[in-house]
Amino acid sequence: MQVTDCLEQNKSRPSWDDYFMELTEVVAKRSTCLRRKVGALVVKDKRVLATGYNGAPTDLPHCSEVGCIREEENIPSGQRHELCRGLHAEQNAIIQAALHGTSIEGATIYCTHQPCVLCTKMIINAGVGRIVFKGAYPDQLAQKMLVEADIDLEQIN
C-alpha cells in the first residue's frame, strides 16, 4: 500500500460527530417502542459515557409485548407523554450515567431525534453542554429553553 492510498482512506474517515451519530442508530435498534426507534449517546472527551434507547423500565413488559396505549388512544406524536409506559432514549442515557456514578456535566448528547421538552429539562439539569441530533422533532418550548440555558443544539444529516 502506498502513502497516497492511506491518505485517501483517511479522507473517508467519519468526523467525530458523524461517528457518534452512527452509533446512536445502532443503539436505537434496541428500542421496543412501536412508534419510533430512538437512540441516545452521552459523550465526553471523545469517550462514550452512557447509551439509551426508548423502552419500558427495567424488568417491566415492553409495548411490543403489551401494546401501545398511545396508539390505542390515537394520541398524536408530541402530546400526552405521561401516557407512555416507556422512557425516552435521552432519559435512559442520563439514568444509566447516574446509576453508574458517571458525571455527564459538560458532555455532548447525540440523539437520533431532537429531544422533547421533558428530555430537554433533564439535559439542562444534568449539565450537558451540547446536543447533536439527526431527525427534527418540532418542540418550540424545548428549543426556547435550550436557548435560555445556552446549550448548543445542532442538527446533522
Image: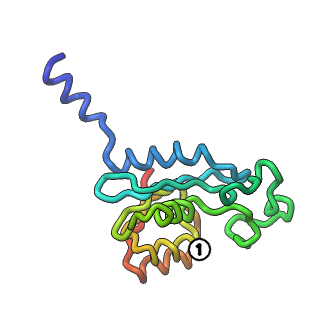
In x, y percent, where is residue 9? 26, 28
Q: In this view, does 87 lie to the left or right of 126?
A: right
Residue 80 occupies quadrant: bottom right
Q: In this view, does 37 lie to the left or right of 80?
A: left
Figure coloring: rainbow
Q: In this view, does 75 lie to the left or right of 87?
A: right
- Look at the numbered disc 1 and give the secondary structure of its residue: helix
Q: Residue furthest left?
A: 3
Q: Is residue 121 visible?
A: yes
In x, y percent, where is residue 23? 46, 45
Q: Which residue lies furthest to the right in this view?
A: 72
Viewer-side residue, 142 vs 125: 125
Q: In which quarter of the image is the N terminus?
A: top left
| Amino acid at dot 1 | Leu
In x, y percent, where is residue 30? 61, 45
Q: Name the residue under label 1.
A: 118
Residue 2 occupies quadrant: top left
